[in-house]
Amino acid sequence: MQDSSEVCENPVALGTKSRRKRAKRKRGQQWAYYVESFKRTVDCLYEICRSDHNINGCKEAIIYLENSKRDFESLINTIKVETTWDESS
């Protein structure tokens, strides 16, 4: 068990930890919001295409999704390179 002098020794570090936790929680909330928004948007586009029998709309949605998939795959590769670079520095 820590005595009170150890706990109060570095209040800046404790404040930093708390800020990091809040920032991490906020980032998690943002992530959940945007993922849900994305899923709703995809569902709405799907329903519009289905109800209107809109083949061109389906194709356009596929183009956007494929481009986004490539962008995220590229981002994964970039992150891996940056991580490797940081670890070797």
Image (cartoon, rainbow, N blue to C red):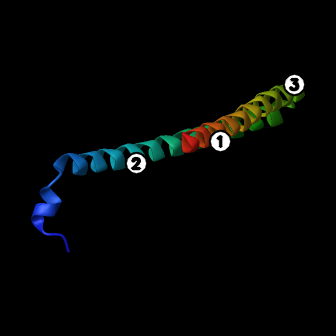
User: Which residue: 56% across, 45% down?
Assistant: 87
Q: Amino acid at mark 2?
A: Arg
Question: Is residue 40 in sight in this rendering?
Answer: no
Farthest-out residue, left? 5
Q: Position of residue 66 (x, y in %)?
A: 80, 33
Given the current orientation, which residue lies at the most extreme bottom position? 1
Question: Where residue 30 sits: x, y (%)?
Answer: 48, 40
The spot of residue 21 in percent (x, y) is 35, 50
Which one is in front in this view, the residue at disc 3 or the one at disc 2? 2
Label 1 Cα crowd, 10 Å radius (few <14 / some 14-19 / many 20+): few
Q: Quadrant of residue 3?
A: bottom left
| Mark linked to residue 25 | 2
What residue did someone put label 1 on?
Answer: 80
Q: Position of residue 74 (x, y in %)?
A: 72, 34
Q: Nearer the viewer, residue 39 or 83?
A: 83
Q: Amino acid at mark 1?
A: Lys
